[in-house]
Amino acid sequence: MRFTRLRLTGFKSFVDPTDLIIAEGLTGVVGPNGCGKSNLLEALRWVMGETRAKAMRGAGMEDVIFAGASARAARNFAEVALTIDNADRLAPAGFNDADSLDVVRRITRDAGSAYKVNGKDVRARDIQMLFADASTGAHSPSLVRQGQISELINAKPTARRRILEEAAGISGLYQRRHEAELK
Ligand code: ATP
Ligand code: MG
């Protein structure tokens, strides 16, 4: 599974549809302060199912919707689409019938978030399962927020253990066991 494209519409400072092609070998995004570099990483985290508004630097989840600027009116929805190359068919069961996965999350003011994979409605929990085993997802240790290193140093041992389990790729097992126990 390889991420190949991130498309943002009305998400934070990206009011107009913006395509980020994630070419092989991409190692950095550079730009002046406030140009939206962190917003891009937040979009990636958000489309993978982030539920904590605080991790998106907002008070509520609707704060990810473009809030308006001097010459532009605020938007009523935000959408992020992530394209995943699944030619190696490494996606979990249930998502493995296509060479490419288009994961879309959209939030509408007063109506909350909805997810689609290849045009079909899915639940937030399905999105978590999609990313649970790949050491990726909204809680991936490979996504490091500005200021997170100092948080890690000051974390309690149980919180630090969760981070290590996520990095070792075993947190998906806990999630599957939990799902199995519910059935
Ligand atoms: P730095 O180099 O300082 O880390 P950065 O490139 O990471 O900067 P971001 O933090 O991604 O910049 O972008 C911040 C910009 O996004 C600010 O100008 C802020 O006003 C804008 N922004 C954030 N949320 C919204 C929103 N909901 N609507 C409109 N603009 C927003
Ligand atoms: Mg930043």
Image (cartoon, rainbow, N blue to C red):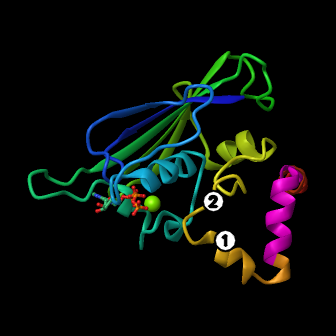
Q: Residue at x 34, y 54 (%)?
A: 32
Q: Return the residue nearer the eye: 121 or 23.
A: 23
Q: Establish if 151 lies above or below 118.
A: below
Distance from mark 2 CB to nearest ligand 2 atom below 8 Å: no
Which of marks 1 and 2 precedes in the sequence?
A: 2
From the top left corner, tell me how far across and down residue 52 is, in percent.
Answer: 56, 66
Question: Residue 153: in sight, yes or no?
Answer: yes
Q: Where is residue 59, by image quadrant?
A: bottom left
Q: Residue at x 72, y 43 (%)?
A: 131
Residue 168 lies in the magenta stretch: yes
Principal SS element in the magenta part? helix
Badge number at residue 149:
1
Q: Quadrant of ligand 1?
A: bottom left
Q: Residue at x 88, y 53 (%)?
A: 168
Q: Where is residue 19, by image quadrant?
A: top left
From the top left corner, tell me how far across and down residue 142 is, in percent.
Answer: 70, 52
Which residue range is magenta in the image? 159-172
Q: Residue at x 72, y 17 (%)?
A: 97
Q: Quadrant of the N terminus?
A: top right
Distance from mark 1 CB to nearest ligand 2 atom below 8 Å: no
Q: Are marks 2 and 1 in contact (CB under 8 Å)?
A: yes
Question: Residue tagged by mark 2?
Answer: 144
Q: Establish if 177 lies above or below 3.
A: below
Kind of residue sitting beneath label 2: Val
Residue 161 lies in the magenta stretch: yes
- Give the CA distance from mark 2 to mark 1: 8 Å
Badge number at residue 59:
none
